[in-house]
Amino acid sequence: MKARIQENVALAPLTTFGIGGPARYFVDAPSENVVLSTIQFAKDQNLSVFVLGGGSNLLVADHGFPGLVMKIGLTGIDWETHRDKAVVRAGAGEEWDRLVGLCVDRDLAGVECLSGIPGSVGGTPVQNVGAYGQEVSEVLVSVRAYDRQTDSIVELSREDCRFTYRSSLFNTIAKDRYIVLQVTYSLTKHGNPAIRYPDVQREFESRVGYPLLGEVRAAVRRIRARKAMLLVEGDPDCRSAGSFFKNPIVTEQQFAELQVVAGPAVPRYPAGPGRVKTAAAWLIEHAGFSKGYSLGPAALSSKHTLALVNKGGATAEDILRLAREIRGRVETKFGFRLVPEPVFLGFDIPLLIQEGWVNAS
């Protein structure tokens, strides 16, 4: 099957922000063959290629993207059982939350706290998606991907992916090299759900006995809905990219210095030996921003200060203007520069590097 090349396709409707200009070329890729033929077309035309998943972690520039956007639509889920484990292989275009629901329905533990996260399966290893005490890297076995450098399809192990907090091989040292086609996970049959995170623990304070996987999934979706982190049709707080800033991970010394400035109430979570994770939302609120704070048509969510939202008619520059104000005030007060989570597409890269929104690498 060959790629069907479309021209000047609007990208805003394909993102949860609902912001951004058109793609010069656009391809919907439902198979590996279409992925390969699309890459060949881009090579022949000397075009930059951007791979689009669910559009839930993306801010598109107002003038759009002058290259080719390929939306990965590979679907299909295979199930394989082994004693106390189940191996799940899912196409990169599968909706992530649908897959989580199917796993929970089969009483497979390992991803229940990742319920309600928008986007596709293919995006989960890129960002090392995580929430409420779980990360994809804990259950990921391998990634099937197209390697643009060697022009071949490869299998990458968990170790190959080089996972750290919200990052991986795919968005750091090998950014733009691989196109994720399929992801394989290993889940625990009839396992207990993860109840490590305070928000989740509070949902079951009055319960006697251990909750079921389905109950934890439902609780996580309720928590996300209260924070405007669950996509709900018609909810203006959902026109966002979810958490706009990452929770800072710092050394013990840096955290001690933060406590001197911010006080002992600053949140603290374990992040590995000698490291501490703190809450970006707490820093934002204590820098003087409240829920619903707005700067023109761009605003903080009325439910959670970590989400920047498009109130209606906002441009990408409106979102960046608000983000700059938030980051600047947090840095001035606490000495930490918040790092953005979304991918920036079509922007002036040297300017983004100069302003510290993306790394020079």
Image (cartoon, rainbow, N blue to C red):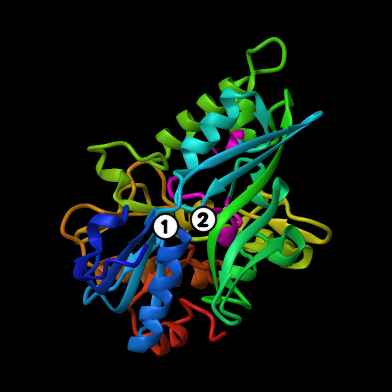
Decide: few, some or many residues near mark 2? Use Cα within 10 Å; few <14, some 14-19, many ≥20.
many
Q: Is residue 143 left or right of residue 345?
A: right
- Residue at left offset 73%, top offset 27%: 189
Mark 1 residue element: loop
- Amino acid type at circle 2 is Gly
| Residue 238 point in image, percent of width and height | 32, 45
Position of 328 with respect to 204 (left or right) is: left
Left or right placement of residue 12 versus residue 322 in this view:
left
Which quadrant of the structure image shows residue 149? bottom right
Q: For the N terminus, which image quadrant?
A: bottom left
Give yes or no for contact between labels 2 and 1 (Cβ–Cβ under 8 Å). yes
Q: Which residues are magenta?
A: 112-129
Which element carries disc 2, helix, strand or loop? loop
Compare residues 203 and 156 and report the one nearer the observer.
Answer: 156
Which of 185/40 is in front?
A: 40
Q: Please, which residue is most extreme toward the left here?
A: 313
Q: Is residue 28 above or below residue 350?
A: above
Residue 96: percent from the left, percent from the top? 49, 43
Q: Is residue 340 visible?
A: yes
Residue 334's quadrant in the figure? bottom right
What residue sits right under mark 1 in the picture? 53
Give the quadrant of the C terminus.
Answer: bottom right
Q: Which residue is mark 2?
A: 122
Image height check: is 361 above or below 212?
below
Q: Gap between marks 2 and 1, in whole Å?
A: 7 Å
